[in-house]
Amino acid sequence: MRTKNLFGSRVRAGTLETLASTSKPLTAYRLAKVIGAQPIQVLTILKSLQSDVVQRTDQGWVLRSDPLRRFLRDELGRREIERRVEKDELLTRLRLKPRLGRGRS
């Protein structure tokens, strides 16, 4: 599933995914830098979601919804597995050795 289709835009999906994948509050500027968007876009999205989904703290923005956090983390995990399988298949076709485990060797 493409989360940008689910959430309506690449920037909104990227913002929520990034907040879901970190435990620390992030500023709108940092979020924009991570997802490759304009800070004003990210700030507008955060302000529109402020009451229900995200919360502003002294250190930055955090995702409030635990079910949404779990959903987004699961989706990111599924995407990573798909990418890893695709990379391993390509390495095998090129007669190179695919990675055996997760992380760096």
Image (spheres, rainbow, N blue to C red):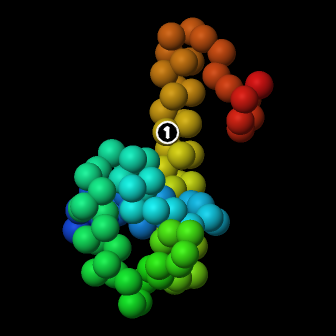
Residue 4 in view in this figure = no
What residue does disc 1 label? 83
Percent from the top left, x then y, of residue 43? 31, 67
Percent from the top left, x then y, of residue 62? 52, 73
Q: Residue furthest top?
A: 95
**Residue in front for this viewpoint, 78 or 35:** 35
Rendered residue at 43%/83% (across/down): 53
Rendered residue at 48%/50% (across/down): 79
Q: Residues within 10 Å of mark 1 (few under 14, many from 20)?
A: few
Q: Residue furthest front?
A: 58
Q: Quadrant of residue 88?
A: top right
Relative to 31, 59 lies left or right: right
Compared with 82, 45 (above or below) is below
Compared with 86, 34 (above or below) is below
Give the residue type that dot 1 points to. Arg
Compared with 71, 48 (above or below) is below
Percent from the top left, x then y, of residue 5? 25, 63
Percent from the top left, x then y, of residue 67? 54, 82
Disc 1 secondary structure class: helix
Q: Is the C terminus in the top left, top right, bottom left or bottom right quadrant?
A: top right
Residue 18 in view in this figure = yes
Rendered residue at 65%/15% (across/down): 97
Q: Residue furthest bottom?
A: 51
Q: Is the N terminus in the top left, top right, bottom left or bottom right quadrant?
A: bottom left
Rendered residue at 51%/28% (across/down): 87
Q: Quadrant of residue 96?
A: top right
